[in-house]
Image (tube, coloured by chain):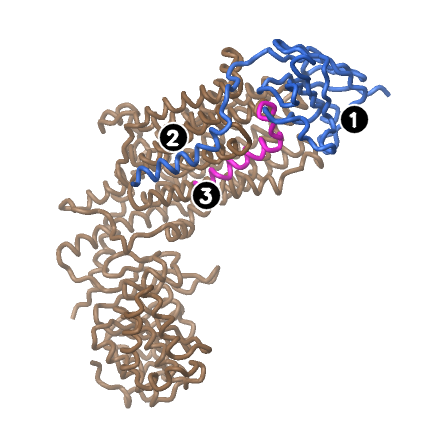
Chain colours: A blue, B brown
Amino acid sequence: MMHRARATVAIALLAPLLAGCGPYLLRQSDRLQITSPQTSTTVAQPLTVSWRAQDFSAPRDGRFAVFVDRDPIAPGSSIDDLAPQDRAGVYVVSTTSLQLKLLIPLAGVDPAEQNHHDVTVVMLDRQGNRIGEYAGFTEFDVVHRS
Amino acid sequence: MKRSGDVIAEVERDEQRHSAEGRAAMGVTGETHVEGFWRELARHHLTLYPVVALGLLVIVDQFQLNAFIIQGPEISRGLGVPRGLVALLVSLQGLALTLAALPIAASVEARPRRAMVAKTTGVAWSVATLFTGLVANGFGLGALMLLDGASSGSVLAVHQPLLLDSYPTSLRGRIVSVYRAFYEAGAVLSPLFVALLTGVFLLTWRGVFLAMGATALLVSLVALRLRDPGFGRWDEARLRRLLRAEPADDERQADEHRLRFFEITRRLLMITTMRRVLLSYAILGMLLVPLNTYFIFFLEQRWGLTPDRRGLFFAGVAVFSVVMVLMFSRHSERLFRSSPGRLFRLAAVVQLAGLCCIGAALLMPVFAAMFVAFGLGIGCFAVVTPMVQTGFLSIVRAQMRPHATALAGIFLYGVGGIGGSIVLGGLDVRYGVVGSVAAVLGVGVFSSIALNSVRRHVDADLDRTVAEVVEEEELRALRASGARLPMLSCRHLDFSYGQLQVLFGVDFSVDDGEMVALLGTNGAGKSTLLRVISGLGLPSRGSVRFRGADITYLDAERRLPLGITQVPGGRAVFGPLSVVDNLRVYGHTYGRQRREVERGIDSAFAAFPRLAERRNQPASTLSGGEQQMLGLAKALILKPRLLLIDELSLGLAPKVVGELMGTVRTINRAGVAVVLVEQSVNVALSLVEHAYFMERGEIRFDGRARDLLQRGDLVRSVFLEGAGATLAPAT
């Protein structure tokens, strides 16, 4: 009886963790890679973010979502679930590059970090849901022309 | 007739006789010679297994947190959880670790099952690491971080107490140092392992957690053969064996006298050494958390180190710690054996040297010199930890060590860490990075001062621990030999209200069925002594024993079932409640046994018919004498074996006093021992054979009541007025 109770408790505890267990990415993949700008570089504005994807062609297989200075959506969730006011810094494109004309210095961070930006690119299926945990990432500093 | 309190005086003489061998049994031999490490292990037929097993556990314990911190950005991007959540989970893990330490300590206080707890929690945090690789969302991540933190609480609570009981005291300092070296090695190996898995094996964050979790699980299996050697195997138990002519069947304290969680915690906080160490840890914690943060900024801004290079930098710094801890271990051992006070002084000096090295690192113009200076500074902190832990754990009773180490962790990471973040956070905005590191180092000086102050108290605290064990053992032997022990015995009681000390080395004893008077001037400490006996006040020194069992730190409500009941001074009634409700409230001690309560109320009314007549009347409407009667009746409901009565006659007419005293005499005749606190000498001495006289917190007279009457220097004429006329023969 005691063992059964313990097993029930263990299953109850583990169930939420296992829920959604799927084909997780265990080895690093170059399926989606940002080619420019390179990580830890300093770039001028306007800048173009470029990437390449394997086994994925937009718009045939879906689109790309580009997240500038913010976290991407969770795997499986839809880009359409983002409320309009939450879409700042989110770009959905069918190409493999995106020109960013002006990146505004970040507020509420250390002055030295205000011009430090990051970009994350993920793949979306044709319904707008994020595909797997594949993500291209780069971080860089931006110089402002005076 | 010889009172049984004299037996306790003999025990006290034994304590003094055994003091030196007691200290030696606890590891403080006074010698500076230290036997070789391996030779000592071989001499005791011991292996390194316990320290290696626990050391491996403490290494893999660091896997989860290190992997989480290093891979935070990847986790955030992979799961799509906010970066802020990742940082929050790191804090939650630390909070769970500190909060879980005391409950884990509580789980091992009754029985020595520390090895089992260490093994179970080791498996728990390994599983947490493994499952982090399979987590699907932020909630799962949070649950696993909490599980990891909570299970890591065992590192704080049980690892070192278990080690101390696994090795002889001659190896204590070195074993604690070796364990610390494992801990520091974890700080090197964990980030390197993450770097290997990501850089060479090209694993994602999930792969890293799965690999590290599997490794941790395998390593945890190494600890499966760990066994708990029992509380105090190499110190307290050894001392008991030295004192004992014959082996005892059961060393465990009776459950009714065994201190429980809050009592142990409170007891520990009353030890001066412990308090000073905790203060020092709290200040050190305030320093360490902001120091790490500010130093990372310093490395980035001054030396342009990227995150991966900063990781390598801190791994390299940890190498200094491993080497220095091992280098200092023999010297620490030597100091501990010769004089724990000197050990604490050295710890304070080394800590101060560490602060200076880190300060120097800020000014170094060359990177290599900065690295060495910082490494030496952090190494000094690492060296201090085993020194302090060896010292303060040796003056704490073996059963209380899990609580002591848990408290140390809470003060270091909880009180200090959180306090430091609040008080010293944001300094860099005002003073810049270098200025904020320097300010934080300044705070650390106070930690060294607190640590240095321990040296004045540690010897006395060690002697007190030895005396407790010797006293327990002597009393056990006396009980076994059939000697008559006093029902109540208080030895050397000191008590203070804050800074104001009111009891000074009070010795006081009561035999079964005896009635004694406790007399003295106003403010002499009589009522305070009763409070200490009934558990309402805790002494800063000395012991209270009931039938030989130590109840000094037992909660007041746990003394009631033993039969100790107090009738407080003044009017001991709840005014707005009726007479019967006053009695019923006291009956709550019986829990849900309503019949027992009703029987008690009936017998109280039988003993005090006047109360029965007023059973539904509010207690506040009773006369002064009736209220005192009600106070006595309430105490009787609890069926006391030792009744402490405080100022029963105060403000009452002589006739009423006579009636009440008659009742007290009846209670005593029924076999209840009574301590009668009185200012009125003639009233008290009319009832008792034995009397104590207190003045300014000290017992000035302990002897026959009639002899007290001869002591004009003590009993002033105001008390004696009419004594001769009213003094009735004692019964």
Report the residue marked by disc 3.
B277
- State the residue in front, B455 or B402: B402
Residue B485 lies, in percent from the top left, at 20, 61
Q: Are marks 1 and 3 in contact (CB under 8 Å)?
A: no
**Three-letter code for the amino acid on which mark 2 is drawn:** Gly
Horizontal side, residue B108 vs residue B417: left or right: left
Residue A125, picture quadrant: top right
As measured in the structure, the alpha-carbon distance from the residue carrying label 3 to the one carrying label 2 is 28 Å
- State the residue in front, B137 or B442: B137
Residue B307, picture quadrant: top right
Badge 3 sits on which subunit? B
Residue B350 lies, in percent from the top left, at 48, 32
**Three-letter code for the amino acid on which mark 1 is drawn:** Ile
Magenta span includes B96? yes
Report the residue marked by disc 1.
A104
Tell me what residue is drawn at x 35 percent, y 51 percent. B260
Q: Nearer the viewer, mark 1 or mark 3?
A: 1
Q: Is residue B178 visible?
A: no
Tell me what residue is drawn at x 35 percent, y 45 percent. B400
Boundaries of the magenta span:
B77-100
Residue B142 lies, in percent from the top left, at 52, 34
**Callout 1 and callout 3 share a chain:** no
Crowding near the residue tagged with mark 2, few <14, some 14–19, many ≥20 C-alpha atoms within 10 Å: many
Report the residue marked by disc 2.
B122
